[in-house]
Image (tube, coloured by chain):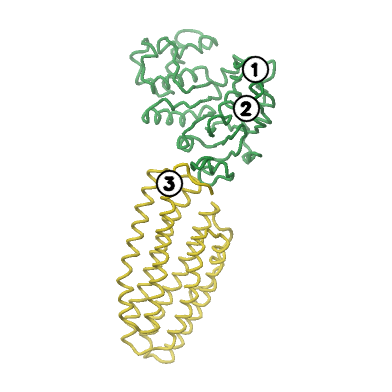
């Protein structure tokens, strides 16, 4: 799209995209570090992740202030308005992603006090799928790639299915060896947090679609069963 | 370029089909198809020289006053051709009133400004009826409270915003069906503008309003439908909300976001 007649407006919109990109990178890094802390039983790293969450919160605050300023001073319409509203929404999604990463890190601090249990690997397996999805949606945002966003949106079902399998696996472990109940319960919450990160990536996909096309994604989101009712 | 047709089944108050306007050799308005819905405020937007005012002036045949202006195509008011040779232009302009950019009250009293049209058209049988029309019009124009104690003072002594509302009172005194407004707030301060905008919203109940404005924010605030003109063509028309959140044509997008070439 061509530039605005008023150049500083373009700079401000580009600045907004930059903050979101930085925030996305930071949320990804927090999530990756939390997973590393879990797999390596690294309590120092986990503590750094917990402390690092404040920086993501700061960026969210910066996005909020900046968007309010743009709304007040530029009175944006059409694609500019969608750009600004999308940034506001995506920043709060990313803030939640980082929160969940910090939660995973907190629980890994507790897990490190307990003997290792095998299902950690299954949780990491789920996490890697969600990491991929998160990376894809952040790339899609930078590239304004709607097709990629729709692919991410459709992949949430994979996450849900894997989560349901993991849930059963953890229950089986706990039944076989009740001494693992504490550790496996923490893992179960971690898995839930990770599954929620996937949901936030899906929300970003929906917002991105609105940003680029101006309409919601069509159709019902394919929904796996996230609550094991058996 | 094709305009997006009306999806609503409500009958169009004003309907333009393949309307063209030529000023001598200059083709100022090109093949415009546009429906104006009853009791809607329709905003016409676009850069200077895009044809929006030209289109507005077609509706009450103000272009007849311009030498070597020629209008072709069909323009109907309630289904009747406005350009039919049997149409009485004076009667037409009573049905389609107009408010201009600069307030232009007559150098007469406030009362006589509003009474002027009803007198010409013989709308009142006696003084009591005329008083009723004048007071009612001033009331509807949101001006009565401010001027009721000085109806005999000159209309030109009012503030700019009051003068513009006096012109609106004068326009509605002859009970028109459609009111055309050509940048009615461009000479007013923000408070007076807000009062006129509030008035436009109230008038919508009884009148069909077409407004030309250079202020995109004003179009967004007051209208239900927005039509975007560019170089004499109607590029896009739609619900105002759609035009300002998700315009379909790149030219509309470029214009309203301030990216115009």
Which of the chains bears the disc numbered 3? A
Chain in green on the image: B
Q: Position of residue A26 (x, y in %)?
A: 39, 67
The residue that label 3 is drawn on is A9
Residue A116 in view (yes/no): yes
Rendered position, B39 above or below A173 = above
Q: Position of residue A180 (x, y in %)?
A: 38, 88
Q: Element under label 3?
A: helix
Can marks 3 and 1 be said to lie on one chain? no
Q: Nearer the viewer, residue B253 or A155?
A: B253
Count of numbered badges drawn on the protein: 3
**Which residue is drawn at the image coordinates 62% and 39% (left, top)?**
B8
Q: Element under label 2?
A: strand
Most extreme residue toward the top is B126
**Which residue is drawn at the image coordinates 55% and 25% (left, top)?**
B178
Q: Element under label 1?
A: loop
Which of the chains bears the disc numbered 1? B
Chain in yellow on the image: A
Rendered position, B170 above or below B196 = above
Q: Quadrant of residue B252?
A: top right
Cβ atoms under marks 3 and 1 closer than 8 Å? no
Of pointers 2 and 1, the one earlier in the residue sequence = 2
Q: CA distance from mark 2 to mark 3?
A: 33 Å
Rendered position, A81 above or below A123 = above
Q: Residues within 10 Å of mark 1 (few under 14, many from 20)?
A: few
Q: Position of residue B21 (x, y in %)?
A: 65, 25
Q: Nearer the viewer, residue B175 or B222?
A: B222
**Which residue is drawn at the image coordinates 43% and 23% (left, top)?**
B141
The residue that label 2 is drawn on is B28
The residue that label 1 is drawn on is B68
């Amino acid at each position: 799209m061509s530039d605005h007649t008023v150049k500083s407006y373009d700079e401000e919109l580009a600045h907004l995209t930059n903050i979101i990109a930085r925030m996305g990178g930071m949320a990804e890094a927090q999530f990756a570090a939390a997973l590393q802390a879990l797999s390596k039983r690294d309590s120092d790293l986990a503590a750094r992740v917990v402390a690092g969450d404040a920086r993501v919160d700061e960026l969210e605050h910066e996005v909020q202030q900046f968007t309010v300023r743009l709304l007040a001073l530029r009175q944006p319409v059409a694609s500019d308005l969608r750009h600004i509203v999308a940034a506001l929404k995506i920043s709060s999604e990313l803030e939640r992603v980082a929160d969940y990463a910090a939660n995973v890190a907190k629980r890994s601090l507790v897990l490190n006090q307990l003997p290792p249990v095998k299902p950690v690997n299954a949780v990491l397996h789920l996490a890697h799928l969600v990491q991929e999805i998160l990376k894809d949606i952040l790339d899609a945002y930078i590239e304004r790639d709607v097709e990629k966003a729709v692919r991410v949106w459709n992949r949430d079902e994979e996450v849900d299915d894997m989560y349901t399998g993991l849930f059963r696996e953890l229950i089986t472990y706990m039944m076989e060896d009740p001494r693992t109940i504490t550790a496996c319960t923490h893992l179960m919450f971690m898995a839930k947090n990770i599954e929620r990160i996937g949901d936030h990536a899906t929300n970003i996909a929906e917002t991105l679609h609105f940003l680029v096309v101006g309409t919601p994604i069509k159709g019902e989101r394919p929904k796996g069963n996230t609550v094991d009712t058996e | 370029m094709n305009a997006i047709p009306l999806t609503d089944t409500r009958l169009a108050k004003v309907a333009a089909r393949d309307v063209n306007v030529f000023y001598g050799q200059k083709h100022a308005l090109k093949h415009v198809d546009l429906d104006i819905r009853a009791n809607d405020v329709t905003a016409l937007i676009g850069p200077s020289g895009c044809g929006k005012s030209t289109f507005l002036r077609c509706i009450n045949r103000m272009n007849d006053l311009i030498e070597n202006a020629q209008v072709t195509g069909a323009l109907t008011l309630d289904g009747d051709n406005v350009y039919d040779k049997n149409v009485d232009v004076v009667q037409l302009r009573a049905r389609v009133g107009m408010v201009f950019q600069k307030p232009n009250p007559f150098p007469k009293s406030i009362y006589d400004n509003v009474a002027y049209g009803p007198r010409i058209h013989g709308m009142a049988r006696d003084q009591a009826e005329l008083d009723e029309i004048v007071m009612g019009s001033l009331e509807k124009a949101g001006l009565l409270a401010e001027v009721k104690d000085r109806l005999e003072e000159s209309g030109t002594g009012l503030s700019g915003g009051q003068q513009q509302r006096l012109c609106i009172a004068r326009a509605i005194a002859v009970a028109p069906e459609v009111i055309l407004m050509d940048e009615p707030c461009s000479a007013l301060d923000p408070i007076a503008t807000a009062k006129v905008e509030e008035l436009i919203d109230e008038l919508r109940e009884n009148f069909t309003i077409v407004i030309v404005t250079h202020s995109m924010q004003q179009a967004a605030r007051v209208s239900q439908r927005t039509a975007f003109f560019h170089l004499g063509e109607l590029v896009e028309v739609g619900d105002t909300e759609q035009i300002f959140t998700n315009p379909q044509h790149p030219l509309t997008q470029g214009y309203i976001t301030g990216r115009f070439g």
